[in-house]
Amino acid sequence: MPSEPTAALIVIGNEILSGRTQDANIQFLATGLGKLGIPLREVRVIPDIEDEIVAAVNTLRAAHTYVFTTGGIGPTHDDITAAAVAKAFGVPLKRHQPSVDKMKKFYSARLNEARLKMADLPDGAEPIETRATSAPGIRIENVFVLAGVPSIARAMFDSVAPSLAHGPPVLSRFVEAHLGEGDIADALTTIQNEHPDVDLGSYPFFRGKRIGLSVVAKGTDEKNIDVVVEKVAAAIRSLNHEPSIDQQTDD
């Protein structure tokens, strides 16, 4: 496991893979984790198949400080994430009575066995509680099981974020110009090789029928990022283009 904290995300759901639903959690979690100095190193999108969930959870929890999952903790037949995570840890599901009591207050007479299923946690797990829903998320060791609904996933993440081991926050700056990637590719390669501790990425765009390029420098050392940004700007000027440089912000 890396010495600096890292994270992985498992997006669970046939609806994501079919294209019926567009995932909205990857960007939020990547940004939120980056602000905590916990880079998101891997994302896997897998179907609602127990063995695949078990395999992904076990592989990634051994490789990263934290693993997050989204999706599959609702009341329907295809919501199997809790059971799969329990299997990954070799423990049974156990109904969490405090969550049952909370759900009784919320659902009243509408509380049925299907909804009560959402109170079944892997034995030894802790509930992730929020004001967004009476049903809990799940924390077991370094694995965090979040809802797939973006607003609830965000509330659950916000609930657990203070407990995570932080690293240096990931900072980001960008330089833009109206030129193509091929025009500056060699210069970017040289700059990246000179500064391996800064993640340098190039992203083409089209605005007003003109092609352009946004070069993003990300890292944890503000001075190194500033140096890289200035080198990229100088490379752009050498091509007779005027760069647009942003101010430094959290990623």
Image (cartoon, grey):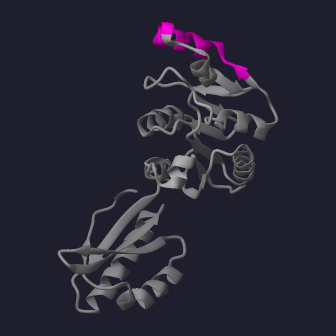
Q: Is residue 247 above or below residue 69?
A: below
Among all residues in the image, which is located at the extreme right? 90
**Residue 179 position within the rendered picture, expressed as x and y whole percent measured from the top left:** 28, 85
- Residue ID at (66%, 40%): 143
Residue 173: name its quadrant: bottom left
Q: Residue furthest left?
A: 208
In this view, 242 is above or below 103: below
x 36%, y 81%: residue: 232
Q: Nearer the viewer, residue 8 or 36?
A: 8
Residue stretch rendered in magenta on the structure: 94-109
Q: Quadrant of the N terminus?
A: bottom right
Q: Position of residue 185 (x, y in %)?
A: 42, 87
Q: Position of residue 237 (x, y in %)?
A: 26, 88
- At x 40%, y 57%, the residue is 251
Q: Image check: 131 left or right of 10?
A: left
Does residue 226 show up? yes
Q: Main secondary structure of the magenta part?
A: helix
Give how far across and how far down residue 63 sits, in percent.
71, 55
Q: Does residue 95 belong to the magenta stretch?
A: yes
Between 204 and 35, the residue placed more toward the observer is 204
In this rendering, would 226 be left or right of 156?
left
Above or below, 121 relative to 51: above
- Residue 68 drawn in magenta: no
* Residue at 41% from the left image edge and 70% from the top image edge: 217
Residue 37 in sight here: no
Q: How many marks?
A: 0
Using residue 237 as the reference point, say whether residue 35 is left or right of it: right
In the visual, does 90 lie left or right of 6? right
